[in-house]
Amino acid sequence: MSETPVLLERLDLAKYPFLPETREYVRTLGLAIEDLCSPAGAAVLRRARERIEAAIERRVDTKLDDDVDVEILSFPTAVLLLRIANDRLLARRFAVAEGKRVSRFLTQEPPEKLVYVATKGFEWRIRKFNGRVGSLSYDFLVSFGDFVSNVPEYRGLWKLVNRPLMRGWVPVSAYELARMAEEATKRYIEGRCLEPPPEGVPPPIGGIVNEIKSKWTERMERLGIPKASKVERPEDAYPPCIKAILEDALAGKNVPHSARFALASFLLQIGKSVDEVIDVFRAAPDFREDIARYQVEHIAGLRGSRTKYIPFKCDNMRSLGLCRWRCKGVKHPLQFYRLAVGRGKVEYEEIT
């Protein structure tokens, strides 16, 4: 796509921390960890804590500090605090919240800036389209590789089978492009937060990190999220696709709806209670017990049509992007489970 000149303001650098211009500007400011303990660094530290605590409380913080430099520096400072905290689940929670923040900003941008942010920030190939395919209107064409690497879920219109492919390009709307950028942002931020912590952390910074971890622990206890050491690991009889979804759910990843259905229906079919299934999803970034209970009870046949649902077949699991294995003599996850319980083992291989 031919580039339309885009003039970035400092406020844009505060909105999109992954842009190369933002990273370069932060470098020129030369903020060191020791500076955060000074009166000048106090405002940056305060704002960084606000962003982390908003994520802990499942809020999307789209506030922009009056001091733009404070807002810009609060992101790398928040990442620094999370690196010191060394909590994968908390890092993932922060990445999800910040990804949604970016998405909300992008949906309000003109097309030129949306494309600029996506191409410069994530090195995507994008073309202008502004056309219709069938009954649907699209704004851009995204290269096939960039599309499949950043789809937020494998269902509905996000499935390639439900979307036109035009000589290696996939049409998307402006909203969909912003949603894909949300996914890319989450990966970028989570990777940054999981980098090794720096050496020689000043005691005041260590104290703030402990306060954040304490608040996070209280939040998890209030929601009933089990600590990693107490989580029951997947049983050997579970098929590898179900194991993978279960591990993602327990780790707090934002599991797509189709995967949640597959996991919940499988667990209910093998005898888990509604409460046990709900507990599996408590670490999800968007968990709400009332909604989770309604959905699990519906799958269990306690609501609506009173039909107890069963998981997808293996072929459907693969078409939804939920399975990358081939299990010998198995066409359904429940068949794998029953065979494994009887034999103790079922052979399978990963599809490359």
Image: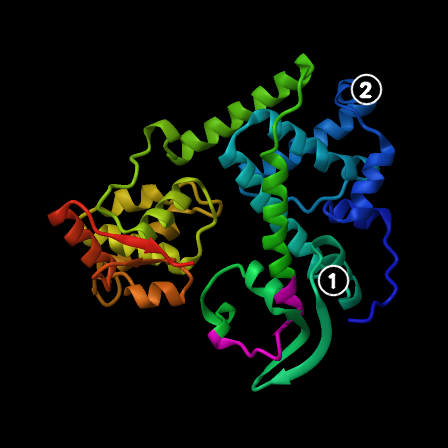
Q: Secondary structure at mark 1?
A: helix
Quadrant hosting residue 109: bottom right
Disc 2 on helix, strand or loop? helix
Tell me: 126 left or right of 231.
Answer: right
Marks 1 and 2 close (CB-CB < 8 Å) = no
State the image quarter where residue 51 is shown: top right
As drawn, 8 above or below 307:
above
Whichever of labels 1 and 2 marks the residue nearer the N terminus, that label is 2
Asked whether, in this view, residue 63 is left or right of residue 323, the answer is right
Q: Amino acid at mark 1?
A: Leu
Q: Residue at x 27, y 43 (%)?
A: 275
Q: Nearer the viewer, residue 32 or 40?
A: 32
In this rendering, the label closer to the viewer, 1 or 2: 1
Q: Residue at x 53, y 35 (%)?
A: 90
Q: Nearer the viewer, residue 340 or 225?
A: 340
Q: How far across and how far down the image is residue 262, in percent?
A: 32, 57
> Residue under circle 1?
114
- 271 w.r.t. 202: above or below: below
Residue drawn where x is 67% and y is 52% of the image: 102
Task: Give the image location of residue 252, x and y in percent.
Answer: 45, 42
Q: Which residue is mark 2?
A: 39
What amino acid is at disc 2? Pro
Q: Which residues are magenta?
A: 161-177
